[in-house]
Image (cartoon, coloured by chain):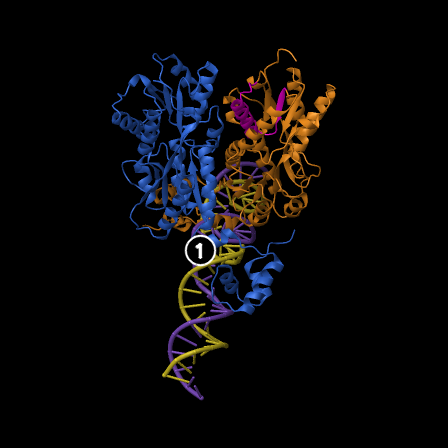
Chain colours: A blue, B orange, C purple, D yellow
Amino acid sequence: MHVRPRLVDVAARAGVSQKTVSNLLNGYPHISATTREKVEAAISELGYRPNLSARSMGRGRTGFIAFAVPSLSNPHFAELAGRVISAAKRQHWTVLIEETGGRKVSEDTVVSTMPYLVDGIILHPESLTDDDVEDRARDTPIVLLGERGLELVADRVVADNVAAAEDITEHLIETGHRRIATVGIRSDAHLQASQFRDQGLRLALARHRIPFDDALVIDVPDYSRAAGVLAAQSLAKMTPRPDAVLCFNAAVAAGVLSGLHGLGVRVPDEIGVAGFDDIDEAEFTSPPLTTIAWDIDGMAEAAVRLLAERYESRDLPTRDVTLKHTLKTRASTTPRRSV
Amino acid sequence: MHVRPRLVDVAARAGVSQKTVSNLLNGYPHISATTREKVEAAISELGYRPNLSARSMGRGRTGFIAFAVPSLSNPHFAELAGRVISAAKRQHWTVLIEETGGRKVSEDTVVSTMPYLVDGIILHPESLTDDDVEDRARDTPIVLLGERGLELVADRVVADNVAAAEDITEHLIETGHRRIATVGIRSDAHLQASQFRDQGLRLALARHRIPFDDALVIDVPDYSRAAGVLAAQSLAKMTPRPDAVLCFNAAVAAGVLSGLHGLGVRVPDEIGVAGFDDIDEAEFTSPPLTTIAWDIDGMAEAAVRLLAERYESRDLPTRDVTLKHTLKTRASTTPRRSV
DNA sequence: TTCGAAATCTACAGCGCTGTAGAGTCGGGC
DNA sequence: GCCCGACTCTACAGCGCTGTAGATTTCGAA
């Protein structure tokens, strides 16, 4: 096995100094055509590639960013991860993906250990408190993903869950639904997304003078398909039965559809179903699912951009970017014939 | 912003040499209790964390491995990625995830560029030829994921697609199906999985003296849900109509179910549906899908282990590990009443 | 023709860690 | 009481790259 060539080998072969090779590699503009030619020839003849650890050291920049989400098994995050990787590549960053499982200890590890390994962190927190983040954000650029919280402790990219929930509720009301059950309101204080969605729902209901009925709130232990199936059972037992369900996540919605199907409850004839997160699957459930689609590309792009800007200058004011969302109406919520 | 403490700062504070601190950090056993105490105190007082780039340089080991798959949007790969990250962590490796889109140029980039950044590569190739891999595997440990190909050019973890296809076909036959259509045989020479699955199907059919009917082969442009919907349309038009479909991937199977549902064809009464890859979703489609489940954990664990062993000694013989698989029978293929 | 700015390139000192080599200390067997 | 091996720790030279400072050359304008 031959030894991997180093910068000095290239320099020797091209008859120039190390720094000249380095300059060429790093896009320094003032290099004569002949020198450029010689160096490039040497590089390709030797098959030289820079050693990135050494480069990191010299530059004091690791070239990595961390992207930490609860779970890659959630297609929403998997897709987002792919987009972040692409967006980061444009900034010459390589992405380290970290799964936190939504556990506070893992999220903590990410913000406390990663800084010594990465130039910045993009985190979708589920359990971390504002204080934990604020502390770390002073040392390392951190971009938060998620919902509009109260305090702005670090740059972040947020979805407007209140507005999205209003939109989808409006749609349910317009298509003739009145008794709208919800699956996924969580009492956990830190899971703010569900609270904002709840808030949006109530706003839309109030606008149409439809009273909010606590009996229509279904609890779930987690946001899984299995939880959705259980929710469907509760749903079917309610009297009078709701004429629509709003699920706070696509997997739960898919589970609800599956559960209702198993129970012989017809969707959308007997009950309309809608959810959040327009994952691939939503278009192909039976029937296809009405959802809120987030601007995933915009999210990834904004997150990386905020991180890059913060990396460049630490004393920028803290910013947040709110994402667009789109209501995707599908067969799971076609208009009801009569109420 | 205070400067991040270095090893030398810890050493100074503890009143020992740098190397002693380094030794402690790296698990060197012969350190007196008092020294250990002093150093640990200094570390925690300063909040010291090692700079990993510097460590990589000193050690000549980057501490990274690359994991390259076609797409994270495929839940099968997303889940696998999560397991690989966990398994790698146990070997003190951090994983860089790379999406290749199955494109040869991207796969090429991974095996040619990554070696200067990682200690090894785990790759699920789709377009790369044996030669491309063989060449690179001499320099950098590479573990291939996928199907049992003809030549063993690098360590690999393979699924026995022939046996899996036989098993699932046997199941279809046992449950009374005779006219078994297939969705997903691809003519592309490099997509060997489909060929092995085809081969397994034929073996099982032959064993039961059921002739293979070319008319029952449905082509798809890709392995997406949308392709499955199209396949369902072809399926419905066939006369006589097949009594079962074997889909070569779970997303396609989900699409087929969705398509059949849209066309009013009842599953499993009129037609049984089965697929490969037991993704989460499979359990919750309507009806739930019979699939082949791979041993994802075993796959991740074996891949990382092979990589680690190869990293330790380059002149090991090339090895391959074959995975177990399990048939998951669900409602999409319940026994037919009559044939 | 002369001079300064721009262009081009070189030399060398780090970046923060680990490996190697070796110095000093301690304790038990003879 | 002496010697040797095991233990504990230190000193210092890299790892391969980039930044800084500065040397040298080139070129257009005065």
Q: Amino acid at mark 1?
A: Arg
Q: Quadrant of residue B146?
A: top right
Image: A82 above or below A18: above
Left-right relation of A182 to A260: left
The span picked out in magenta is B243-267
| Residue at (39, 22) in percent of width and height | A272
Image: A287 above or below A70: above
Q: Is residue B254 magenta?
A: yes
Image: B144 above or below A35: above
| Quarter in which the C terminus of chain B is drawn | top right
Left-right relation of A211 to A103: left
Which residue is label 1 attached to?
A: A59
Left-right relation of D13 to A338: right
Please name whichever residue, B111 or A6, is drawn nearer the observer in this view of the structure.
Answer: B111
Dot 1: chain letter: A
Q: Quadrant of residue B208?
A: top right
Residue A122 horizontal/vertical position (percent):
40, 41
